[in-house]
Amino acid sequence: METQVVMDADLKKVCEFMQRNIAADRLVSVAENLGAMAPILWGRYGRCILTPLLIETKKPDAIPKL
């Protein structure tokens, strides 16, 4: 069985931007505070359902016979 972890595309863009532009020792604090401030900054916009991480498990097509 093969397992794959897939990150939401928009969330991935934000994470990549943050990693390129924010010092490593500040990333967690910035992300936590951004999450707390998000409703204040962008609360007037609608929200969509977001699945941040999706774990996909693929079953083999066929089971080999012994």
Image (spheres, grey):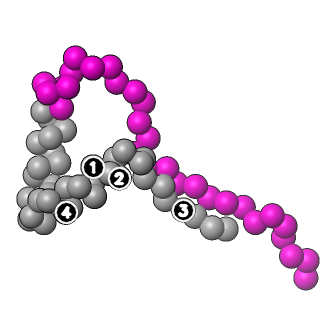
x then y, percent, for residue 42:
20, 25
Query: From what the image shows, is residue 2 above or below residue 12?
Result: below
What residue is shown at x 13% (from left), y 25% (from top)?
40
Q: Give the mark nearer the N terminus: 4 vs 3.
A: 3
Report the Cα–Cα distance between label 4 and label 3: 25 Å
Q: Give the mark nearer the N terminus: 1 vs 3.
A: 3
Of the pair 44 and 50, the residue shown nearer to us = 44
Of the pair 54 and 19, the residue shown nearer to us = 19
- The crowd level at tag 1 (other Cα within 10 Å; few <14, some 14-19, many 20+) is few
x then y, percent, for residue 46:
32, 19
* Residue, disc 2: 12
Q: Amino acid at mark 3?
A: Gln
Q: Which numbered tag is attached to residue 14?
A: 1
Of circles 4 and 3, which is in front?
A: 4
- Looking at this rendering, what residue extends furthest in the top direction? 44
What residue is shown at x 17% (from left), y 48% (from top)?
31
* Residue, disc 4: 20
Report the Cα–Cα distance between label 1 and label 3: 21 Å
